[in-house]
C-alpha cells in the first residue's frame, strides 16, 4: 500500500524521488549507463569546442588581418601562412626599394612595410623564449591604425611597444627587448592569427635594436638593417580582385611572393570543412552505437522490473505515469553522465587547442568562460536527448504491459 499512497499524492517531486531511488538501488547498472553517456558527451564537447574555436579563429583572421595581400621575399624559408597565422620568429629580408616598385601596380589603395626580428631567451629580454618582434612604419601603417585610433594614439613613441592579445602582461608595464627598456602602450584585441603573440614597435627602433644586438650580427653581413624590410602588406582598392593584384605583383619578377590572404583563409576553411565532416561522421557513428547500447540497457531494465511495474499498474498507477517514471530515470542517469562528460570535455579543450596551436600553427579563436559554459550546456542537452531516444521505446513498452501478465512473467523471468 505504500506505493499506492505514494502515487496518489500527485506531484512531480514525488516522481523524481522514486526515479532517484530506483537509480541508486541499481548502482552497477546506473554507473554503466552514466559512463556510456559521459564518454559520448565528452567526445562531443571536445569535438564541438575545438572545431568551433578553429572556425572563430578563421573568421577573426579574415575580419581583422587588415591586409588583402602579403608580399614576402621569394627565396625565404618562411611562407605566407607561417607569417600570418603563427608567431614563429622569421628573419627574412628584402631591399626596401621593392615596396616602391610594388606601389606602381594598379589596384593598390594602401601599402605598408614591416621589419621582422625577434626577442631572445637571454638576459637582454624579459620574455621567455624567442618571440616575434615586428617593426611597423607609422607613416604608412593601416594594420595597427584602428587600434591606435581607438586608444587616441597617433603613433607609438620610440620607447613604447604594443603586445598581442596572448602575450602576458608585464610587471609595471615595462618590457626589456634586445637590451632596450620599453613601456607597454597596450594589448591588441584578438585576431586569431600570429599577431596575438607578436610585439609591435616602430620600424626604425626595431632596426636599431636588431643591428646593435650581438646575437643577430650574422644576419647583417650583406646589407644593413636600415635598408631592409621583411614584408609588404597591401590593401587593395575597391573593385579590384586581391588575387589578380597579387598575380600582377608576382609578374614584376622582383624575387618576391605575393599571396592574397583571402585565398589562404578560403583554402584553410575548405580543409577545415572536410575535417569537420569527417569528425562529425565519426561522432554520429559513436552516438548511434551509444543509442543502441543504452536501448539495450533500458530494455533489460524493463524486463528485470516486470513484476514491479505490474504491481504498480495493479494498484492503480496509470500507464502515463509508468512511462514518465522510466523517462525520468533515463534523464537522471543521462543528465548526470552528461554533466560529468561536459565538465571533463571543457577542462580538456585548452590542452588540445594549445597542442594544435604549437604543432600546426592553426588560427584560434578565444576560448572564454562563456564559450565553455555554452559548450557544457550543449553537452548536457545532447545527453538528455540521448537519454530520451534510448528510453522512449522501453518506456512505451513498459507502460503497455498488462498488470497480471507482467506479474506472472516477472515471477518466471
Image (cartoon, rainbow, N blue to C red):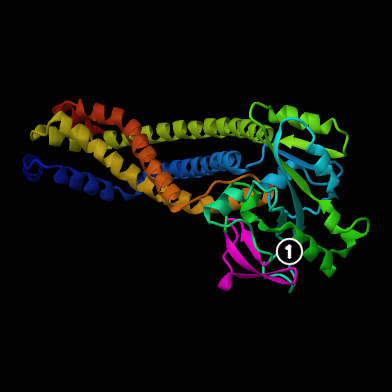
Question: Residue 18 location, x and y as percent?
Answer: 19, 45
Given residues 36 and 378, the one toward you in this image is: 378
* Residue at 59 percent of width and 31 percent of height: 273
Q: Which residue is mark 1?
A: 119
Q: Residue furthest right?
A: 222
Classify residue 287 as left or right of residue 218.
Answer: left
Classify the position of the N terminus by image quarter.
top left
Residue range in magenta is 159-186
Does 69 sit left or right of 151 as displayed? right
On the question of residue 135 being in view, the answer is: yes
Crowding near the residue tagged with mark 1, few <14, some 14–19, many ≥20 C-alpha atoms within 10 Å: many
Q: Quadrant of residue 331?
A: top left
Q: Quadrant of the C terminus?
A: top left
Where residue 198 appears, x then y in whole percent?
Answer: 66, 56
Coordinates of residue 174 in the picture (x, y in percent): 61, 71
Query: Which corner quadrant of the image does residue 41 belong to?
Result: top left
For this view, does 277 lie left or right of residue 140?
left
Q: Is residue 205 above or below residue 377?
A: below
Task: Please identify the quarter of the rendering in which residue 171 is found.
Answer: bottom right
What x and y, as percent, mark residue 170? 59, 69
SS state under label 1: loop
Q: Which residue is at a point 74% across and 57% down the rendered structure image? A: 203
Residue 163 counted in the magenta span: yes
Amino acid at each position: 500500500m505504500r506505493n499506492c499512497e505514494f502515487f496518489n499524492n500527485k506531484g512531480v517531486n514525488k516522481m523524481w524521488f522514486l526515479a532517484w531511488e530506483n537509480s541508486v538501488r541499481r548502482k552497477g547498472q546506473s554507473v554503466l549507463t552514466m559512463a556510456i553517456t559521459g564518454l559520448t558527451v565528452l567526445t562531443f564537447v571536445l569535438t564541438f569546442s575545438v572545431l568551433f574555436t578553429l572556425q572563430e579563429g578563421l573568421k577573426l583572421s579574415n575580419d581583422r588581418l587588415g591586409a588583402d595581400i602579403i608580399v614576402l621575399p621569394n627565396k625565404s624559408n618562411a611562407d605566407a601562412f607561417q607569417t600570418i597565422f603563427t608567431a614563429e620568429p622569421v628573419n627574412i629580408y628584402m631591399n626596401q626599394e621593392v615596396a616602391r616598385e610594388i606601389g606602381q601596380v594598379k589596384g593598390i589603395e594602401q601599402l605598408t612595410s614591416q621589419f621582422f626580428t625577434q626577442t631572445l631567451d637571454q638576459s637582454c629580454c624579459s620574455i621567455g623564449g624567442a618571440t616575434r618582434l615586428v617593426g611597423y612604419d607609422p607613416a604608412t601603417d593601416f594594420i595597427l591604425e584602428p587600434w591606435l585610433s581607438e586608444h587616441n594614439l597617433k603613433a607609438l613613441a620610440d620607447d613604447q611597444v604594443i603586445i598581442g592579445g596572448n602575450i602576458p602582461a608585464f610587471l609595471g608595464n615595462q618590457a626589456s627587448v634586445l637590451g632596450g627598456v620599453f613601456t607597454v602602450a597596450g594589448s591588441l584585441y584578438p585576431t586569431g592569427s600570429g599577431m596575438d603573440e607578436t610585439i609591435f614597435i616602430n620600424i626604425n627602433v626595431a632596426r636599431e635594436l636588431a643591428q646593435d644586438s650581438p646575437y643577430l650580427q650574422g644576419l647583417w653581413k650583406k646589407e644593413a638593417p636600415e635598408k631592409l624590410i621583411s614584408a609588404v602588406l597591401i590593401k587593395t582598392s575597391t573593385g579590384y580582385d586581391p588575387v589578380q593584384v597579387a598575380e600582377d605583383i608576382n609578374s614584376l619578377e622582383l624575387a618576391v611572393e605575393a599571396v592574397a590572404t583571402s585565398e589562404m583563409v578560403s583554402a584553410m576553411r575548405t580543409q577545415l570543412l572536410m575535417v569537420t565532416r569527417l569528425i562529425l561522421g565519426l561522432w554520429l557513428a559513436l552516438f548511434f552505437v551509444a543509442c543502441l547500447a543504452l536501448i539495450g540497457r533500458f530494455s533489460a531494465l524493463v524486463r528485470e522490473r516486470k513484476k514491479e511495474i505490474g504491481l504498480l499498474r495493479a494498484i492503480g498507477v496509470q500507464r502515463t505515469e509508468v512511462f514518465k517514471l522510466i523517462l525520468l530515470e533515463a534523464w537522471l542517469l543521462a543528465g548526470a553522465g552528461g554533466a560529468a562528460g561536459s565538465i571533463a570535455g571543457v577542462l580538456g579543450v585548452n590542452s588540445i587547442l594549445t597542442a594544435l596551436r604549437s604543432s600546426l600553427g592553426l588560427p584560434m579563436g578565444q576560448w572564454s568562460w562563456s564559450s565553455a559554459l555554452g559548450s557544457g550546456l550543449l553537452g548536457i542537452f545532447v545527453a538528455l536527448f540521448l537519454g530520451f531516444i534510448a528510453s522512449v521505446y522501453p518506456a512505451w513498452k513498459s507502460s503497455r504491459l498488462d498488470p497480471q501478465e507482467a506479474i506472472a512473467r516477472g515471477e518466471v523471468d
